[in-house]
Image (cartoon, rainbow, N blue to C red):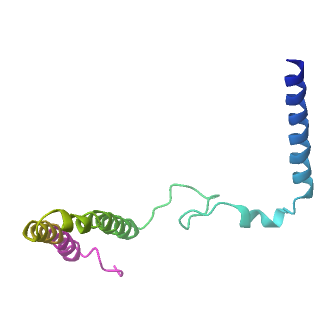
Amino acid sequence: MILMINIFIMIMIISNIIMFLSIILSKKTFSDREKNSPFECGFDPKSSARIPFSLHFFLITMIFLIFDVEIALIFPIIPLFKMVNLFIWTKISFFFICILLIGLYHEWNQNMLNWIN
């Protein structure tokens, strides 16, 4: 038991020495403060978090996520081609593509795809 306590104390001493050496020898300065600050979505982390953002940016993000998820849904259709006959595979693929095209037409009709408002 004493051996375990001694090993634990040695580990704590060595790890603290290494941490203090890294702090002393690091090349961080106050001029690197902006460089080391977190950058998230173009917002300044030191300003108010309640500033308005563009709704258009949000809609484009949602459209991207929807089309990104649909690619993940299209991948399982490819191996399905070997498991079922051609007629069923064509009906499933056609139905899925029609749903996507109807959604794309609705987004186009609502002017969500226009980059300039």
The residue nearer to you, when weighing 40 against 47, is 40
Residue 10 versus residue 5 in the image, above or below: below
The residue nearer to you, when weighing 13 against 25, is 13
Q: Residue at x 72, y 67 (%)?
A: 35
Q: Residue at x 62, y 58 (%)?
A: 45
Q: How many marks?
A: 0
The quadrant holding residue 58 is bottom left
The percent coordinates of residue 70 (x first, y second) are: 28, 65
Please identify the quadrant where the N terminus is shown.
top right
The residue nearer to you, when weighing 55 against 80, is 80
Please identify the quadrant where the C terminus is shown.
bottom left
The percent coordinates of residue 26 (x first, y second) are: 87, 59
Q: Residue at x 65, y 58 (%)?
A: 46
- Range of the magenta residues? 99-117
The quadrant holding residue 92 is bottom left
4 with respect to 67 (left or right)? right
